[in-house]
Image (cartoon, rainbow, N blue to C red):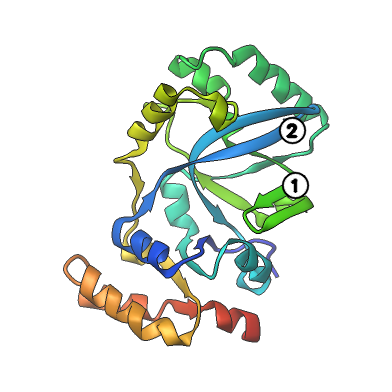
């Protein structure tokens, strides 16, 4: 059995969030990433959309942590839109020390040229191999992030995305507002043929989601596309009981 999937999946924790994605595409949000390199903490706020590359037979723990609703796409869609797998780095590896030195030379006032951004762009795709997972529900110590097999969509350096290092409280309101303004009209789009799965919580929600697709996407998608999407619905309940 392959260790990776032929699809990538984004999970969320509410039906409204999933409907918003199906209706409008993915909004790009800023996520604070805390990365330990060479024993030092690097805090960077990355505009991104995250996905996982996990086979359905091994997806249960991911659903528990990130939500029972989601949408899965073909790897071809991911490649076409410039997504990339995350690079998992051990905190004190030789590579982590090299990355720390490179980043330390580049961090300045945040007013970087395109060339300077390209030099350290890899930082937007880095996560520690193992570190504490902090969620609203609590902290999981020494969580192995590499098990998530994360893929990321991160806007191109040619877009006017601001590189924001440090905690949110340490960043000026002007810089934070500027970063959010750039992302306001940015989204990650897809076509119906790109969708492999639509995950909902249980069977009781199936008719509601079918009605949603027909009412909200009927003017945009063909009848064939709508009917095809209804066959892509799978419930998290099924995964926990049958897979």
**Residue 41 picture location, percent across and down:** 72, 29
Q: Say which element carries label 1.
A: strand
Q: How many numbered discs sit on the rendered protein?
A: 2
Q: Say which element carries label 2.
A: strand
Q: Nearer the viewer, residue 78 or 104?
A: 104
Which quarter of the rendering shows the C terminus?
A: bottom right
Give neighbour class at mark 2: few <14, some 14-19, many 20+ (Cα, 10 Å). many
Q: Name the residue under label 1.
A: 132
Q: In which quarter of the image is residue 127?
A: top right
Residue at horizontal 29 percent and vertical 75 percent from the top: 212
Residue at horizontal 36 percent and vertical 37 percent from the top: 183
Which is in the foreground here, disc 2 or disc 1? 1
Give neighbour class at mark 1: few <14, some 14-19, many 20+ (Cα, 10 Å). some
On screen, residue 146 versus residue 24, left or right, reads right
Q: Distance between the residues labelled 2 and 1?
A: 11 Å
Q: Mark 2 points at which residue?
A: 36
Up-down relation of residue 11 to residue 43 (above or below)? below
Residue 141 appears in view: yes
Residue 159 appears in view: no
On screen, residue 223 versus residue 11, left or right, reads left
**Residue 91 picture location, percent across and down:** 79, 35
Q: Nearer the viewer, residue 91 or 14?
A: 14
Residue at horizontal 57 percent and vertical 82 percent from the top: 237
Q: Quadrant of residue 20?
A: bottom left
Q: Quadrant of residue 57?
A: bottom right
**Residue 110 picture location, percent across and down:** 50, 17
């Amino acid at each position: 059995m392959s260790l990776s999937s032929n699809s990538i999946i984004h999970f969320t924790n509410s039906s409204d969030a999933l409907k918003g994605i199906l209706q409008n595409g993915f909004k790009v949000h800023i996520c604070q990433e805390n990365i330990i390199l060479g024993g030092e903490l690097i805090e960077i706020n990355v505009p991104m959309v995250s996905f996982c590359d996990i086979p359905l037979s091994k997806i249960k723990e991911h659903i528990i942590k990130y939500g029972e609703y989601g949408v899965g796409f073909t790897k071809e869609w991911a490649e076409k839109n410039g997504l990339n797998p995350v690079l998992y780095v051990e905190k004190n590896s030789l590579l982590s020390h090299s990355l720390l030195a490179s980043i330390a030379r580049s961090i300045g006032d945040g007013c970087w040229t395109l060339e300077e951004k390209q030099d350290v762009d890899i930082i937007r795709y880095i996560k520690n191999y193992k570190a504490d997972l902090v969620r609203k529900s609590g902290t999981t110590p020494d969580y192995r992030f590499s098990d998530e097999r994360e893929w990321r969509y991160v806007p191109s350096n040619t877009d006017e995305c601001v590189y924001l290092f440090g905690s949110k409280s340490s960043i000026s309101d002007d810089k934070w507002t500027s970063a959010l303004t750039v992302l306001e009209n940015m989204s990650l789009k897809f076509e119906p043929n790109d969708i492999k799965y639509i995950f909902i919580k249980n069977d009781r929600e199936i008719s509601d989601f079918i009605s949603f697709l027909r009412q909200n996407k009927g003017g945009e998608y063909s009848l064939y596309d709508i009917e095809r999407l209804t066959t892509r619905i799978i419930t998290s309940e099924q995964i926990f009981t049958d897979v």
